[in-house]
Image (spheres, rainbow, N blue to C red):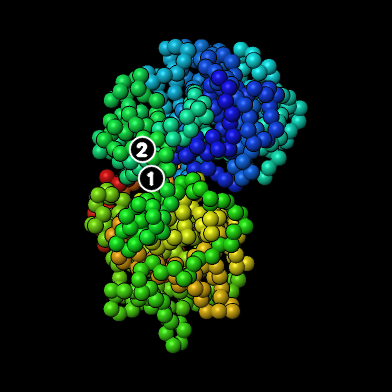
Amino acid sequence: MIFNIDDKLLRDLFALCSFPVPDDELVFFSLRGSQPLEFGGTAFAESHKLMAMQIDYRHMRCTIGQWRPADKTIAVFVGSSVPNVNAIQDGLGANGTGVNRLASGLFGQAPGSIDYRYYKGNHGFDRHLAFRNDQKLPVWRTADDLDFAGDDRFEIHKVVYDNLHCARQVNETANVFSSNGCVVVAGRPGDSNASKLTSELGPWKKFLANAYGLPQLRFALAIFEENEALRIAELGIGGRGPTVRFGSRGILVERVQAGLIAKGYDVGGAPDGRFGLKTALALHRFQRDTFGPSGTDLIAGRATADALGIAWPANGSELAALLAPLPHAGSASGVAPDSHGVADAGIATSAPAGVTHDAALKIEMDVTHAPLPGWTIKANAAGDRWTVQFAGQATPLNLGKLFVYNDYPEGPTRGLARTSGMAPKIPYNPADWTDLGHWPELIFPTAFAESNANFAVVNCWDRAAITFGFIQLAAHTGDDLLPFFRRLATELPSEMKQWFPELAVIDGKLCFVKNNRYRSLENAVPAYDGGFSASYYHGDLMAYFNPDRYHKTRPIDQAELHASARWFVWSLTSAAMRRVQVKASIESLRGSLRFLHAKMLADPAVKALYPRGVDGMRCDLLAVALAVPHLGEGNIPVALRALRTADPIEKIRISGYGPGGRAQNVHDGMLARPILRNLVYDLTSGNPV
């Protein structure tokens, strides 16, 4: 059967799988069980015709594509994302070792998680120009027959080096090609150890030229199973049920994770909405236990949801409704407003009808928005202190004061400071969050140093532009506020719309929305104010919350006042929001833990003392060590030097790293939680135990 593939079909596929779309990148994809009608590789165009066919492991019966979401064009090539039968046959004698079939999914990057994207590099015995992947990937191995099914072995624990390279076969209909599990495109390789195109032949040459002609270094790859694209083409998104699998993100993933945990399966921690290796392994075990081998495919849909006892949309239309943008209060949508006049209908993961991408859209907070009736922000007579008040609040609340920091070499920064000593306080107490395990205890020393364990602390006066909350989630890195606000949009859609109506999740990214146009805030670009920036700075996000850190011509921005007021009062009035903040803070510290673990194993002296890295480490030590890279990864030598000594906790305490007696404050926070001495970190489960 012949069908068309275009931008809409790919967006529908991504939406049904809860895959975020990297709008500003070139994206690779594989549609198993299809071939382009145009051999030789195509140019980028709005649509192409494909022929559906059955995979036989002998011929290249996959469409390998390149997608430019920004201009809605696609190029397609004959290739394969399953191995050749000759490699499978060779692997049978070795119990399947050396050959595999990649699980379907999105091999991309979620902020704060492992980067599974393919990067420019060289492959094979001849080191020809290709795309490499050296992460642990979810794969199937067969040791009994020449195909891959639910009764075969599933693995997540090894680096399999499933790269993307040429098939060493120009004939696109030949019954032999070179793949032991790598994704391949028809063609011949170029020169050995090349860093640019040389003597490549066939579709592979075009595929390489399209990618290597860009400054982009890493490329997400989405792999779909047989007939998934065909069924979308036939039935549309309203005729297909949503699924989640490796690389999926969002509320459906979180539901699956919660269901697996409730059934006694370990997903590697609390539900976080990110479908990674641990979730894949848990799903595999659950499906094998529940459905047997024939029902085990690592894809969670309606049948798996029913077995888990979780709610599940019947089709893509219901999924879109679940994630649709909120109508304004008083609209004729039929969705009942909540107590603040906000209808609870969700937040979009794809652009709503009539809302278009605009890369030039000016990013600016709407400072006229009133999240509560009677919302008023006032300055004192001197113009250096502010209060916020709203209906039902008899007296104004302290919002903060002007603070000037003079120790940056580029000059003083100025901004609002809501310090830990200002009333009202909102204490962070791990005892309030015991359902999240012992992680709330592990992060307490960092919270104590950052905010004196106070949800109500806000800092708009340093290079980060703005940091919020008890763990001081920051705007500049992209690793803190971006995943946090995406989580808020998913878990608390009506509250998100009430407090930050300009923000929405579109195609998996946090975006600024205004007048039916949107622009992603997830871009690593310099700060708008022309001051200090680093390569990882997220200037668009910083500009939304605080467009000027230096304030040479005015004392403070209205944007930072309103952002701080919204954050503070939302935290004060919503236990649900505080809960999301705790979960986001745990994820932020998980990132610091992964960094610390890797650096420990890379340091011979530290590895000699801690051969398993953080695994098995006592949590009083881990808590104070974790706080070091959380302040900034450049501080990691402090932790490593301490870990080489007989008393690392004391060594970190007296190191004096960080401002304001931070090292001592972390130590004091650790002493305040004696339970940490009785816990150790278990790397397998990802939790203190």
Placement of 14 over or under 38, stated as above or below: below
Inter-mark Cα distance, 1 to 2: 8 Å
Q: Nearer the viewer, residue 619 or 282?
A: 282
- The answer to whether residue 180 is visible is no
Q: Quadrant of the C terminus?
A: top left
Q: Which residue is mark 2?
A: 313
Percent across and percent down for residue 125 are 64, 24
Mark positioned earlier in the residue sequence (1 or 2)? 2
Q: How many marks?
A: 2
Percent across and percent down for residue 30 are 55, 29
Residue 240 in the figure: left or right of residue 37: left
Q: Nearer the viewer, residue 156 or 445?
A: 156
Q: Nearer the viewer, residue 586 or 507?
A: 507
Q: Amino acid at mark 2?
A: Pro
Residue 268 in the figure: left or right of residue 432: right
Residue 248 in the figure: left or right of residue 70: left
Percent across and percent down for residue 53 are 54, 18
Name the element at disc 1. helix
Residue count near mark 2 (Cα–Cα under 10 Å), binned few <14, some 14–19, many ≥20: some
Q: Residue at x 29, y 32 (%)?
A: 306
Percent across and percent down for residue 342 are 36, 59
Name the element at disc 2. loop
What label does residue 322 carry, if any?
A: 1
Q: Residue at x 31, y 74 (%)?
A: 391
Residue count near mark 1 (Cα–Cα under 10 Å), binned few <14, some 14–19, many ≥20: some
Q: Quadrant of the N terminus?
A: top right
